[in-house]
Amino acid sequence: MTTSRPSAGMAAPDFTLPSTPDQKVKLSEFRGRPVILAFYPADWSPVCGDQMALYNELRGEFARFNAWLLGISVDGVWSHAAFAMDRKLHFPLLADFEPKGEVARRYGVYRAEDGFSERALFVIDADGVVRWSYVSPVGVNPGADGILDALEKLGTGKERR
Amino acid sequence: MSRLTPAVSDSDHRSGPDDAPVTLVEYGDYECPHCGRAHPIVQEVRKRLGRRLRFVFRNFPLAEAHPHAVHAAEAAEAAAIQGRFWEMHDLLFEHQAALEDSDLIGYAKRLALDPGRMKDELAAGTHANRVRQDFRSGVRSGVNGTPTFFIDGVRYDGSWDLDALVEVLERAAEV
């Protein structure tokens, strides 16, 4: 079932997904820190400036807001592991693999006709509430300016310079 | 719509008149193959537009993907302090496979800069902050990979092949 995208002020739907063959990540375990949830269509995008590679470079910027970054696609854990190793990614990639796209559907960002998710960003505050979201037009890498604006507006007072 | 933040200022590396009718800003990485491919295209674009174009380059080194990119950017900044930014910029893009510190020091020598000073400044990270500032400005401006171009302050998501760039810049210059 595909639901509509949770809007700002709504509780972020909780989920548990594998991040590696033997580890799982539960969204609500991150309470107390902001979470950036970055849905992307697929591993192995053919360009070097791709979205996940960009966010990987920005870990220091996100860390200034004490925020966790989670990538999420319908690829399986083995693809994620190979992709992360090849691109030297240092943040978790979650496998929305079984049932396929279930979490993307719950966030209203699944493209059923394509079998993968939109490029969609959610900034979730320390209490698990969605504070900002954005769905990028197909084929356009959304960059990170919106994420940083949203983190700044959280006003947690925890920003470190 | 992603906008250039902060706007072009005196602290930027600028080529062409400040009152040119159109400004092209590139965020780039000296080790990025796509930027390497864009370099001769941008040079040709600059030639064709001539005095009607102001070109600005800002650093956006993808350090995880490109281990030499940060020092290469710092070397360009070091050359800038000694008045030779664009010469170093061209050398770096023309030698993307040779960006070890020893190569960078060699380029300083070739440009008749003080190689000892280049060596010291790279080791000390003298220009690291400047490069980092460029990078952060890129992030805030919506840079989503390299190269990313801005035309008159607005991110340009179209094709950057020669004909496409010339056409869009010609049009912007006429307005």
Image (tube, coloured by chain):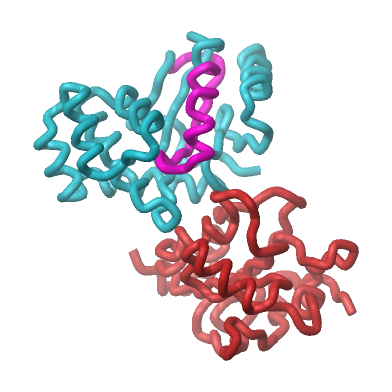
Chain colours: A red, B cyan
| Residue B172 shows in the view | no
Q: Give above or below for A156 relative to B30.
A: below
Q: State whether residue A95 appears in this view.
A: yes
Image coordinates of residue A120 in percent, x first then y, are 70, 63
Compared to A88, does B29 lie above or below?
Answer: above
Which residue is depicted at the point 55% across and 19% down?
Answer: B22
**B148 or A107: nearer the viewer:** B148
Numbered disc total: 0
- Residue displayed at 81% across by 68% down: A110
Magenta segment boundaries in residue numbering: B18-45
Asked if residue A118 lies in the magenta stretch, the reply is no
Looking at the image, which residue is at 69% across and 48% down?
A140
Report the front residue among A141 and B161: B161
Q: Residue at x 54, y 85 (%)?
A: A30
Residue A147 percent coordinates (x, y) = 57, 61
| Relative to B151, B105 lies left or right | left
Q: Is residue B67 left or right of residue A104?
A: left
Residue B44 within the segment the image draws in magenta: yes
Left-right relation of A119 to B126: right
Which residue of the protein is positioned furthest toward the front in this rendering?
A: B97
Residue B174 horizontal/vertical position (percent): 65, 12
Looking at this view, name the residue that lies furthest to the left: B116
Q: Quadrant of the C terminus of chain B?
A: top right
B4 vs B60, left or right, is right
The spot of residue A61 in percent (x, y) is 43, 62
Q: Quadrant of the N terminus of chain B?
A: top right
